[in-house]
Image (cartoon, helix red, strand yellow):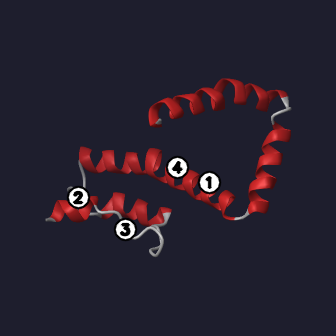
Amino acid sequence: MRSRAYWTLPPLLTEQPPTAETIAAYARHAAYTGTTGPRRAAGILWCHTIAIPALVTSRMWAWTWERPGRFVTVTVTVKLLSFLPPVAWAVDHIVTPATQHALTLFL
């Protein structure tokens, strides 16, 4: 039942999540493939382009929601920054479409 262990979630409330260094070390040295080759290169590419950025994003999101003061501070800062022309453009052309796409994808 090796596949069951692969797909079973860890205890999310009691176990520390892996660090970015741990994920990078797994991509470079884990036994999921040989020491070199296209599968190893794909695993390392995935690690650096998807896994670590997603980890950082989720940790920052969790950090923001841990305390009400952080959430209010971040919300007010983002709202104030949205009045600056470059940020307003980014919100209109990047953040809003990305949010709409995520909502259609997940809901």
**Where is mark 1, residue-wise?**
61
**Residue found at x 57% / y 51%:** 57
Q: Position of residue 3 (x, y in %)?
A: 18, 59
**Where is mark 2, residue-wise?**
32
The amino acid pointed to by label 3 is Pro
In the image, is residue 52 above or below residue 1? Answer: above
Q: Residues within 10 Å of mark 1 (few under 14, many from 20)?
A: few
Q: CA distance from mark 2 to mark 1?
A: 30 Å
Image-based side of 88 in relation to 56, left or right: right
Q: Which badge, 4 or 3, is on the more N-terminal residue? A: 3
Q: CA distance from mark 4 to mark 3?
A: 21 Å
The amino acid pointed to by label 4 is Pro
**Residue found at x 23% / y 65%:** 5
The mark found on residue 53 in the picture is 4
Image-based side of 22 in relation to 93, left or right: left
Q: Which badge, 2 or 1, is on the more N-terminal residue? A: 2
**Residue at the left extreme of this rendering:** 1
Image-based side of 104 in relation to 95, left or right: left
Q: Which badge, 3 or 1, is on the more N-terminal residue? A: 3
Q: Residues within 10 Å of mark 3 (few under 14, many from 20)?
A: few
Q: CA distance from mark 1 to mark 4?
A: 12 Å
The amino acid pointed to by label 1 is Trp
* Residue 98, quarter of picture: top right
